[in-house]
Structure formats: structure tokens, C-alpha cells
Image (cartoon, helix red, strand yellow):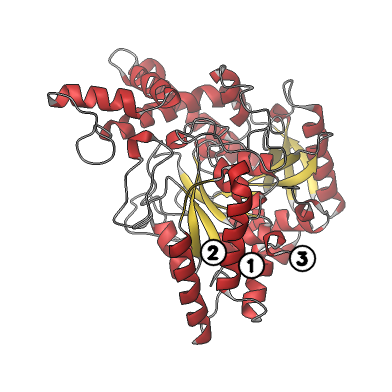
Amino acid sequence: MEPHELTLTQASGMLASREASSVELTRAALGRVEAADPRVRAFVTVDAEGALAAAKDADARRGRGEAGPLLGVPVAIKDNLSTRGLRTTCSSRMLEPYVPPFDATAVARLKAAGAVVLGKTNLDEFAFGSSTENSAFGPTHNPWDLARVPGGSSGGSAAAVAAGFGFGALGSDTGGSIRQPAALCGVVGLKPTYGRVSRYGLVAFASSLDQVGPFGRTVADAAALSQAIDGHDPLDSTSAPRAVPDYAAALPRGVKGLKVGLPREYFVSGIAPEVAAAVRTAVESLAAMGAEVREVGLPHTEHCLSVYYLLATAEASSNLARFDGVRYGFRAPASGVVAQAMRTRAEGFGPEVKRRIMLGTYALSSGYYDAYYRRAQQVRTLIARDFEAAFREVDVVATPTSPTTAFRLGEKADDPLTMYLSDIFTISANLAGLPALSLPCGFDAAGLPIGLQLIGRAFEEPTLFAAGHAYESAHGWKDRRPAL
């Protein structure tokens, strides 16, 4: 097996048994990036020198008797997470020259665990998008079909893992930005419970919705990354002071006796028949392994998209007000502070960012706040209560991750509403603050991956890992690789 075909768990095992060194795996990963990334364009920045230095340090640490599942393992980081000494652009001209003086907490914890950072991955500008076509540096291509999108906004991270450029990656998820690209690229992605992972150092999109999470080729890979980055952080006021469970110990639990809910509202017109069939077959497989499946209702699902695009754009409008050309990043020349800010924002932001800032500013404006923003917050509470009611009957809710498989580059670029519908099944978990896992559950007739989403109770990531691992172990989807 070639190095780029390994899972994180397999690579970690080879490092532990001294079958390979971190320097060898890192050189192999960098070679793979050099050979194939010009076609995929998963990376915005590759830090070969820094990665090799970190790999040498990891080998030295292992030589001194240190151990750990991530020690010496090459990974990638979404380019909206701060990395000390390595530029963080958010795939925007606004931050193109910005080099942070600090690491995001999730990045710092990965480094402390010995992971080797290969570089920063492409995304929709400021994480505004569902296809990674909105990047100022050009789109990322799906490794399964280079004419198609990898999903977004964390499309670079998902594509990097699918293409074998690294053994894992970090992304961020505000309305599906980890899970949807994971589904479209045939990998595993987790959006953790809100508060489970520190947001410190994540460039804010919508602060009440954003979460940092992992990508891996398998559920065990995602669990290992989660084990490293999860936990309370005093630098993040929304970080939950809760102990982190042993995720590896949860993997063998299986699904016998697990109650799985199938929401009737998620199997509607607009979902591709092959996607619906694959997800129903996956749920039947869980039932065959001992799970109990029942239908549940989430009656306010029809309002999720409207609520999300009011709240997320409102928070984005507020968060992105800081990019004025005064303190950091791009600055357009102009006479006077006001003219400078206006010109900087006009030239530094792309069309989708401007669209969302305008939508959010309108929703927060005098005379419209109560009609839009306040009402959306009230309906958000109803959506959360729907899940509370469902979880009195079931342990996990199973849904499609995306209504379709990967669509063609440019196919939805001129139709923002159709693009927004790509996240129709993922948004609700963010609104309710719940953990949700996407994993492969099949392929369509064109050979494109299909994703199964499992949503759990708050802080019940172990249940999701156990259910996902049980399903994954019974099928061979995780062993398929794109032919780059």
C-alpha cells in the first residue's frame, strides 16, 4: 500500500512500530501534494520547510520514548484557523498578506500532540459558501471528478484528505461546512457539539454557530483528531468546562439497542433518488446490526434555511466590520479614514462576502431587527426543542448529509439560492448546537460519494463515533480511493 492510501490510524501504527519515520511520511505527503495538487488545488499555502522540521522533531520525541496517536502524523489546516508564522488568508484578498503571531487553540493542541502541519487549505472566502468556488485563489476540485466541486466551505481540507495529501485535516462548520464536503469527497467529517472545541483563533463567521472539527478517512481517524483538539479553553468564553471522554474506547460499542430516528421531513422532493436510497439502505444496515429504527418528526425543519441565513449573515455583518484596512490585512490607498475603509472593503471582499454582509446588515437595521433577527432567534429555539423531543425517543437521528452528490464546477455559481440549498440537511445541527457526523454510505451511478449524517445529543460524540464505526466496519466504502 502506498503512503497516500493509508488512514491516519494505519500511519500512526507504522510510526509506533518504527516501520516508517515521520520524515518519510511527511516527504511522501509533500511529494503527493507536489504531484497532484496542481490539479486539485486543495492548498493555499504549503509549508514544506516547516513540516519537515516538525517531522524531525516528532521523530526525536519518539526516540526519547514519547508516544501518541498523532505524533509525527502529517495533517492539513483550513486557512481560517490562525497559524503562528504561517499566513492565514481565509482565501480572501483582504487577508492575503496576514501572518498571525499566534496559533488557534485547536492548532496548538494538534502541534502539542506531535502532528505535522503540511500547510493551509483552500475554502470559500471567509467560509461563505458550499462549493469552495468563492475563494480569491480559485476553486478546489473534487478528487473523485476534477470537473466537480468538493463542497464547502472546508472543501480544501476534505479534498486534501480524499486525495491522500495528509492523513487528517481540520475544518470549520457553521452550517455544514465540514459535513457537506466530507460527504461530497467520500471522507469522514465531524461537527462537534457547540462548546466542545475552542473557537479561539478561528476567524469568526457566525459566532453562535461556528465550530472547529476534524476530517479523516475513517471514523477512528476523526476520533483521534477530536481527542487531541477537544476540551475546555479559558481563552474562549463559549468553551464548555466538560471532561473529554475516551473516544477510542467508545468505538467498539456497536449499535445493539441503539435507537435511531429517521426524520420524515428530511426525505422530501429535491433529494436525489440515489442519495435517499443509499441513506435508507444504511439505516437498514444499522437495524440489521441490532439498532432499533423508528420515524421521528422535526416539524420546524422547513424554517431552518430561512433562520440560518438571517442569523448567520447578521453575525457575519458584525464580525466582518473589523476588516477596515486600519489594523491588519489589505489596505486600499485613499484620502481619509472613511474613504479608506470603503475602498478597502470594496476591493478586498469578494461578491459572496459582500452579499452576506448586506443581507445581515439589513436584518439588523432599525425597523427590521424585530421582524427578522429576533423572530429568527425565536424559531431557532423551536428547532432546538424539536430535537429535544426527538431525543426523548431516540439516541441518534439519521439523515442524508447532502441532497445530491457533487455538482459540476460553475453549475450553481449564478444561483445563490440553489447553492444555499446544498446545506439544507446540515444547518439544523448548528442551530441546535448538536454534534453531527458525516461518513460515506455509498456511491451514485457516476461513481461519486454519498454521505450519511448522524446527529446526536449534545456532548454525545462517543455515541456518534460508536454508531459510525459500527456501520463503517460492516461496509467497504472507506477503502475506496479516487484515481488521481
**Residue type (three-letter) at the residue carrying disc 3:** Met
Residue 143: x percent and y percent?
A: 68, 43
Asked if residue 153 lies left or right of residue 438, the reply is left
Q: Label 3: which residue?
A: 1
Instruction: Single out the residue that lies furthest toward the top.
Output: 367
The amino acid beneath tag 2 is Gln
The residue at the point 59 percent across, 26 percent down is 300
Residue found 60% across the figure and 68% down from its top? 25
* Residue neighbourhood size for the residue with mark 1, other residues' Cα within 10 Å, grouped as few (<14), some (14–19), many (≥20): some
Q: Residue at x 27, y 27 (%)?
A: 344
Tag shown at residue 248: 1
Label for residue 227?
Answer: 2
Quadrant in the rendering for residue 405? top right
> Cα distance, mark 2 to mark 3?
27 Å
Which of discs 2 and 3 lies nearer the camera? The answer is: 3
Q: Residues within 10 Å of mark 2 (few under 14, many from 20)?
A: many
Residue 246 seen:
no
Q: Left or right? Give the position of 47 relative to 20.
A: left
- Residue 437 visible? The answer is yes
Q: How many marks?
A: 3
Q: Compared to 340, does 443 lie above or below?
A: below
Quadrant in the picture for residue 370: top left
Three-letter code for the amino acid on which mark 1 is drawn = Ala
